[in-house]
Amino acid sequence: MYLIAGLGNPGTEYAGTRHNMGFSVITELSDRYNIPVKFREKKAMIGKGFIGTEKVILAMPLTYMNLSGESIRPLMDYYHIDADHLIVAYDDIDLDIGKLRVREKGSAGTHNGMKDVIRMIGTNDFMRVRVGVGHKPDYMDLKDFVLSRFKKEELEAVRESVKLAADAVVMMVEDGNGVRAMNKVN
């Protein structure tokens, strides 16, 4: 069983913002595999289903971004999921819109949500998909930038990157590692 968590902020005021790319990936997987994410459990909205023959839990933490680990860790404990069966999708301001990076482990970089996940689960040895949201303009505060919505001319690239990120997650689940996904999207 895999726990696939998309990082973001709950509430309609955050829907469609750069910081909610992880939620967008979970929504794509939910739609694609008919796994409704409608149950509240361990401070998250979750859905249970299958990708191929592998059982998965799709999760959107409701803790707000910077406390994402407070939801992911209890889900891992409750469902007896080890870190090697955790996949986290999240936004990355160091990547151009439309660009992805798949890693099997690594640091959180500047991402506070990932810092909290790593702190709460006690390891950085888990798979992740970083979805590029573009670089912060010099004139903007970081918080304002990540909580902003995409420009009209960016939306097509955003939609394609969400689909490709979902494809990468599927490959990780099917293969049990990130090698094929890394070769395809990095």
Image (tube, grey):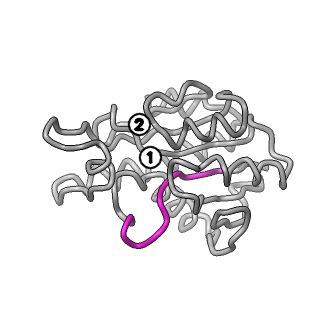
Which of 86/162 is in front?
A: 86
- Identify the residue at horizontal 40%, vertical 73% (top origin): 12
Quickly name the residue at label 1: 164
Question: For residue 20, what is the image quadrant?
Answer: bottom left
Q: Is residue 170 left or right of residue 79?
A: left
Assess disc 1: are there few (<14), some (14-19) or many (≥20) residues with their C-alpha within 10 Å of its C-alpha.
many
**Vertical position of residue 23 compared to residue 112: above or below:** below
Which of 148/157 is in front?
A: 148
Question: For residue 24, what is the image quadrant?
Answer: bottom left
Residue 146's spot in the image, x, y percent?
32, 49
Q: Is residue 140 left or right of residue 30?
A: left
**Vertical position of residue 125 compared to residue 99: above or below:** above
- Identify the residue at horizontal 45%, vertical 32% (top origin): 101
- Identify the residue at horizontal 49%, vertical 39% (top origin): 112
Please tell me whether mark 2 sits on a helix, a strand or a loop.
Answer: strand
Instruction: Specify the quadrant that holds the C terminus.
Output: top left
Q: CA distance from mark 2 to mark 1?
A: 8 Å
Which of 117/99 is in front?
A: 117
Question: For residue 136, what is the image quadrant?
Answer: top left
Residue type, label 1? Leu
Magenta stretch bounds: 4-14
Q: Are marks 2 and 1 in contact (CB under 8 Å)?
A: yes
Quickly name the residue at label 2: 100
- Identify the residue at horizontal 66%, vertical 33% (top origin): 126
